Amino acid sequence: MSSIESDMQNYKELLSQYLQTRDEAILYQAEQFSKQSIQQNISPDEIVNVHYEALEEVMPNMGERVRDSFQFLIETMIAYGLAYQEHQVLREKQIELRSEIGVAANMQETLLKTTVPSDEKVDIGVKSVPAKEMNGDYHHFIKDEDGNIGIAIADVIGKGVPAAFCMSMIKFAMESFSENEINPQRVLDSLNRVVGRNVEEGMFVTMFYGFYDTTDHQFYYSSAGHEPCYILRYDTGEFEEIDAKGLLLGVSGEVSYEERQVDVRSGDLIILLTDGVTECRVDGRFIEQEEVLDIINQFAHLDAQGIVEGVFKYFERLQDFQLRDDFTLLVIKRKD
Amino acid sequence: MNLHIDDHLEQDVGVLKLSGEIDAYTAPQLKEKLLSLVEEKQKVEVDLLKVSYMDSTGLGVFISALKLSKEKGHEFKLVNLQENVYRLFNITGLNEVINIENTVEGEIT
């Protein structure tokens, strides 16, 4: 006897027993039957059909209309079964994709990992949190042989997986610069060409590049359409904007970037950020830039990593906090 | 929040009047309408008077339109930008390469 025939026999017996006794234990067996059917990929219309055939034997004088109604139900269940099957397949695919994206996100993290340089003259802290699984923000440190530090912070316009790919490209381009090539203007000029050549239409990158000269505490910087950055003066407690004019990377090959410099005094704090920091939404409204700076000021007495962790935790604790965009906050504090 | 797009012709100029928010959810429909208009018309004008918010995805749409207009030799400009929307064009340096006329404050009803 094939399994469906034995199941059929089984179902018929269960049904007739139940109709005679109304014993609840039989309902439990019916439940087992339906679980087995799922395992054997038996569709809902087949089960209705089994029920119909069993009923014909148990109650031979079923009326014509009841018979017709079963045909009707079987047709309905065929369509239901197909739709359900498709739904299952999609669900499985979704789980598979999600786990692949998880793997990709891990790979990205490993790939884009950068070590925060430790230095006796400056203290550096950074916090980067993606809004979705993959981060479209990027930061990168490099230290030259004289102990000067190059710092990049970037934001890919466009989110998710494509943005992450774009970031990997930028990272490898940046690593191809030798240590004595890391002046901000030159870095941005050449990255602009790399992005323009290699990135598909509709994706663009903003970047702020800074070079901290640890000998005379000058901070040189250029910006490719990036959010303005700030320096918090230790002696006055005032923020000054540090911003240079410059077009987004990859829009036009004919631009050259402006380079500026600022004198960093003892205890001053340089703040680099991406627009995710200013695009957090709380209670349905955006956090204003001044508010962000206020919060940074509150934590400014801590060490660099303490500042960025403190600021993020502060926003995270606010009610209905929602990250609309990847969030990166990077600070550099002059120690002596 | 949604984006409402109204398009009409004003003496051969294709005009898109936008109202609402431009973000990752509304940008695709804007991109489709805007690019086909830039493709067809010699002159295209986008009125942003009633756009209260735009994120960087919106910038992507306007950069694509700019590139297409250059390829085609067509004119493309943005008018009536709210201060906070203009700020994005200013930060990204796009105000230097995109034709922008008239920025306003308030007037959103």
Image: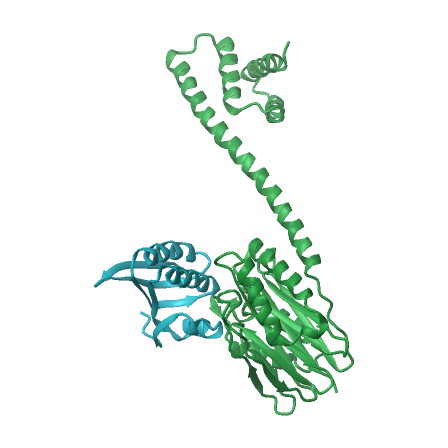
Chain colours: A green, B cyan
Does A273 sit above or below residue A233? above
Counting every numbered tag in the picture gives 0
Expressed as whole percent of the image width and height from the top left, the position of residue B59 reads: 45, 65
Q: Quadrant of residue A134?
A: bottom right
Along the line of sight, the residue nearer the viewer: A66 or A122? A122
Q: Which residue is drawn at the image coordinates 49% and 22% (left, top)?
A: A45
Q: Which residue is drawn at the image coordinates 58% and 57% (left, top)?
A: A132
Q: Quadrant of the N terminus of chain B?
A: bottom left
Expressed as whole percent of the image width and height from the top left, the position of residue A176 reads: 68, 64
Q: Quadrant of residue A171?
A: bottom right
Along the line of sight, the residue nearer the viewer: A227 or A190? A190
Along the line of sight, the residue nearer the viewer: A63 or A132? A132
Q: Is residue B83 visible?
A: yes
* Side of A133 relative to A116 (left or right): left
Q: Quadrant of the C terminus of chain B?
A: bottom left
Expressed as whole percent of the image width and height from the top left, the position of residue B62 reads: 41, 63
Q: Which residue is drawn at the image coordinates 67% and 89% (left, top)?
A: A265
Expressed as whole percent of the image width and height from the top left, the position of residue B101 reads: 33, 74
Along the line of sight, the residue nearer the viewer: A286 or B72? B72
